[in-house]
Image (cartoon, grey):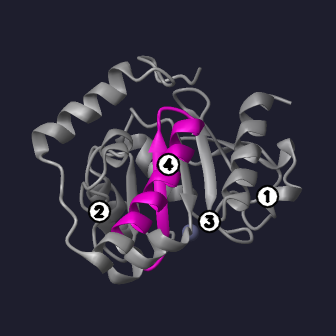
Amino acid sequence: LSFLTERLAIINTGKNILSEQLTVGTWGNISCCLTDNLVAITPSGIEYGLLRPEDIVIMQLNGKIIDGLKKPSSETGLHLAIYKQRPDIKALVHTHSPYASVFATLRQDIGPFLEDQVQIIGGTIKVADYALPGSNELNESVLKALGSRYGVILANHGALGGGRHLDEALLACRIIEKSAMTYALAANIGRPHALEPNIIEHLRSFYLEKYAPFGKKGRPR
Ligand SMILES: [Zn+2]
């Protein structure tokens, strides 16, 4: 089986988002780039615990399926649109995590309140304008709200984290959820303070270029 390591990493990420309660059931989806033109993505509607390596669908950036008998995730078009527009992003994890869902329903951005958020996401976590799942309108609104950052919230839907590899995309989803929880709690007590733009820029570039676990090449460990 080709790309076994990557297929297993996708399955493992699926088990993580389930066990960490970042999603429920079969919702959410996970993909990563294998080469400049090949993407691996979770199939539609299969429990993460039951996924086998051969169930992971491998396709070209134009959507042509190369390997896999299962139907690819219904959000495949969104993943491919992001990879085409953002060559710095090589992996995507989409969740329906609870606190991010709160901001998805409010359609309210999460300001740059925490250092880890601005390091890993790159600043404000914006909410993309609502559009139907699988539509071109959704691809466009998500790309617009994502900007040059690594995380975004889909209105009335869920969260999407990206990164230079799967571990970083999963980390982005965890940080989106923690930022949403922190903001929700903080706003209940008082008025959170946002970080200044020059501080955000400093923290983000330090993380991308020098932070040890992910290093300059963006590979873990
Ligand atoms: Zn979803």
Ligand 1 is located in which of the four quadrants? bottom right
Residue 74, disc: 3
Q: Is residue 115 visible?
A: yes
Q: Main secondary structure of the magenta part?
A: helix
Foreground residue among 146 and 77? 146
Q: Is residue 157 magenta?
A: yes
Q: Secondary structure at mark 1?
A: helix
Q: In front of the other: label 2 or label 4? A: 2
Say left or right for 209 vs 134: left
**Percent coordinates x, y for residue 220 in the rendering:** 57, 24
The residue identified by callout 1 is 48
Query: Label 3: few (<14), some or many (≥20) within 10 Å?
Result: some
- Residue 17 position in % (x across, y down): 66, 56
Q: Secondary structure at mark 4?
A: helix
Q: What's under tag 3, amino acid-wise?
A: Ser
CA gap between label 3 and label 1 equals: 15 Å
Q: Quadrant of residue 191?
A: bottom left
- To which quarter of the image does residue 75 belong? bottom right
Q: Residue at point 74% right, 71% down?
A: 25
Work out whether residue 62 can be spotted: no
SS for tag 2? Answer: loop
Label 3 or label 4, whichever comes before in sequence order: 3
Q: Classify mark 4: residues with Cα within 10 Å, few (<14), some (14-19) or many (20+).
A: many
First of labels 2, 4 by sequence position: 4
Please report the bounds of the magenta region as a residue range: 155-183
Q: Amino acid at mark 2?
A: Lys
Residue under the image location 43 percent in, 37 percent down: 89
Task: Out of 191 and 84, give the one closest to the viewer.
Answer: 191
- Residue linked to disc 4: 80
Identify whether 1 is placed above or below 110.
above
